[in-house]
Image (cartoon, rainbow, N blue to C red):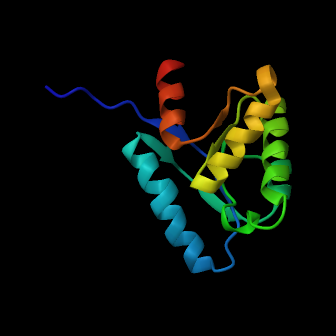
Amino acid sequence: MSKKKELFKFKDAVYWHDYESKENVKTDFSIQVLSPCIENNIILEKWRFTEFPSILTEQFDILFFDWGGMSLGNSMMEHFCSYIIKHANDHSSRFYVMVSLMTKAAMKDALYSFGDNKPFNVFLTIEDLEKHLKKNK
C-alpha cells in the first residue's frame, strides 16, 4: 500500500515579478512556481500577479519573488530583498520564496547581511520551503 502524500495548502499566493508581458508572466509562473509546487506537494488554491512592492501591504499567505532581469544596472532587487526580509520578520505567519537564480542570489546576500536577525520564513527555493513545512508540521 502506498503512503499518502502530505499536501501543504496555501489559500492566497502572490507572484511578484518584473515582467512586462502578461503572457510571459503566466508562462513563467506555471514553469517556475506551479510545477515545482506540485512536485513538492504544495497546493496553491488562489494566486495573483503583481509588479509592485505595495503588495506587501495586502493580505497573502505566500509570496513568490522573481525580480531577476530588472536588477541589472540598479539596486532595486537589493532594496526589495531587504524590504521582504523586514516584512517577513514582522509577519511570521507568511512565507516568502525566491524563484529565479538572480533573485535567489540577491536574497542570499541580503540574508547574510542580516546575520542572526534573518527570518525563518524566507526561502531561497520551493524545495527549501517544502523541507521546512515537513519538518514543522
Question: Which image quarter is the N terminus in?
Answer: top left
The reply to whether residue 58 is in sight is no
Location of residue 116 by image quarter: top right
Q: Quadrant of residue 113?
A: top right
Rendering coords of residue 45 (x, y %): 53, 50
Where does the image place residue 20, in percent across and percent down from the top left?
A: 69, 78
x 50%, y 71%: residue = 27
Residue 137 in the image: state x and y as whole percent.
Answer: 51, 20
The extreme front residue here reads 73
Task: Give the side of residue 128 with respect to residue 67, left or right.
Answer: left
Residue 133: x percent and y percent?
52, 27
Q: Is residue 108 above or below residue 117?
A: below
Residue lying at the far left of the rendered structure: 1
Say which residue appears at 77% left-offset and 35% top-offset.
88
Looking at the rendered structure, the number of numbered marks drawn on it comes to 0
Q: Does 105 sit above or below residue 133?
A: below
Q: Hey, which quadrant is residue 96 in on the image?
A: top right
Residue 61 falls left or right of residue 73: left
- Looking at the image, residue 116 sits to the left or right of residue 6; the answer is right
Residue appearing at x 28%, y 29% in the figure:
4
- Answer above or below: position of 134 versus 15: above
In this view, the residue in front, 10 or 67, is 67
Residue 115 in view (yes/no): yes
Residue shown at 56%/79% (left/top)? 23
